[in-house]
Image (tube, rainbow, N blue to C red):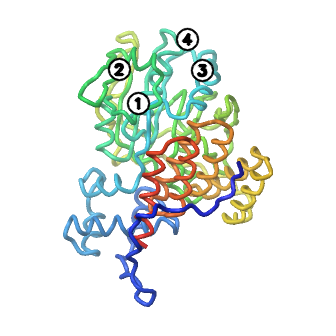
Amino acid sequence: MGCTLRPVSTPGNVAPSTRPPSGAPPPPGPPVEPLAAHLRARFGLTFSPHRRKELEAKLARQLRLTGLGHDEYLVDLARSPDDAPRVQELLAELTINETRCFRDPRQLAAVEEVALPALADAHPGPIRAWSAGCATGEEAWTLALLLERAPALYQRPLEVIGTDLVRARVEAARKGEFGPRSLEGLPPDVRAGWFTPSTLDRERLDADRLRCRVSFATHNLVRDPPPPGPLSLVVCRNVLIYYDDPADQLALVRTLIEPLAEGGWLVLGHAERPPEGLAGLEPVSRSGAVLYRKRAGAALRTWPVLLQEEPPPAARVIAPLAATEWPITGHAPAPAPAPPPAPPPAPPVDPAARLADAMARADAGELDLATGLLLDLIAARPTAAMARVLLASLAERRGELGRARAWLEEATYLAPADAEVRRHAAAVFDRLGLPVEADAERRAAAAAERST
């Protein structure tokens, strides 16, 4: 089956479009440029042009909820601390909370088969890991389970630190309770051995020995210092997509790898790659995934982070951070060394031409080449939703149903109001044999068309 995107019919009972006549454009929404500038300066979040409509809708909703005028709302937002409800509500709306336990089995297999045995050999002391942008905790608890179950790390002191920008998600993560969607990919033996029902439709991670090894904190990856090193493993998946500017991506990845010990490992989302101009990382491929190992000699920046006094190592098996957040607010990082000269800019990527080239390659049966073109497009344009739909189609052709579904979920979360993306996602869901999801995408496509 080819990968050409063909028109997808919509159900016959879809209501006709309610868009205004061609001569009457819809009323403009509130101006978003001041809010976009504030979010970038304060949190590093950037919004490419195709996400400006989404930002406009979120801003309009906040103005309705608060009853404030546009300028009054922006002034109030700027004066509010990060943990103020108004700031937290906006961040929760603007950042995607799509996560599951044991998401992307290929990456996790690479961590188990390559990174953890290498850490066991190279790091004789405690194994400390950081799950950055952990949302409601699924990633951090998965990481803790991987470390706990690894034969190479038997009886080793272990610690996992989970951080996220949104306080409500951090509070949910501490509970270690998850609903059906979060547990979809959970291996049966893990579910049977580590989880117990807590309410009608939720299950709780029930293991005191694991819970004492995991801590959570609110954390701003752009402004706050990372957890103190040395760390053995840093996992930060599907966060770079919020940073369109290569300079912002470079700063973020440097923050992630600075506390890594030599020989430590970085895990990014399967469609994410370290930005150009970053030295000190060695890519290692295994099980269809790419991990990054910190090379010997890479500098480790020291951040002036104040922590509670740690008891002597003999007093307990592990030495976790405090159960509450470490006091990072107000502590600026040490001055960074001057970055190396930036490489010459790469020629701009034409998304439409790259998509057309990838589809032509796929139709010719060159699936690997098509996949590489699409991954390169995502590296250049992290929010490219249609590229993810095409990757889902390629994965479906290979029989990789779980990966196809993951690509579709990323695409629809990145472009929730893009009717074309939702229609083609519905077509791929149909081929995957998932009629409920396909129908939901068709309804979303129809709603997106009515709103334009």
From this viewpoint, which residue is outermost toward the bottom? 23
Q: Amino acid at mark 2?
A: Phe
Reading the image, the residue beneath label 2 is 195
In the rendered image, the vertical position of residue 341 relative to residue 431, given as above or below: below
Q: Are marks 2 and 1 in contact (CB under 8 Å)?
A: yes
CA–CA distance in space, label 4 to label 2: 21 Å
Residue 157, image x, y percentages: 46, 15
The structure residue drawn at horizontal position 52% and vertical position 69%, both measured from the top left corner, is: 49
Q: Tell me which label, 3 or 4, sits earlier in the chain.
A: 3
Q: Are marks 3 and 4 in contact (CB under 8 Å)?
A: no
Mark number displayed over residue 416: none
In the rendered structure, the answer to whether residue 339 lies left or right of residue 23 reads: right
Give the image quarter of residue 421. Answer: bottom right
CA–CA distance in space, label 3 to label 4: 12 Å
Reading the image, the residue beneath label 3 is 119
Residue 388, image x, y percentages: 59, 51
Q: Tell me which label, 1 or 4, sits earlier in the chain.
A: 4
Mark 1 is surrounded, within 10 Å at the Cα level, by few (under 14), some (14 to 19) or many (20 or more) other residues, namely: some
Residue 310, image x, y percentages: 35, 22
Locate the C terminus and report the quarter of the image it occupies.
Answer: bottom left
Reading the image, the residue beneath label 1 is 183
Q: Nearer the viewer, mark 2 or mark 3?
A: 2
Which element type, helix, strand or loop, lies under badge 3? helix
Reading the image, the residue beneath label 4 is 151
From this viewpoint, which residue is outermost toward the front? 12
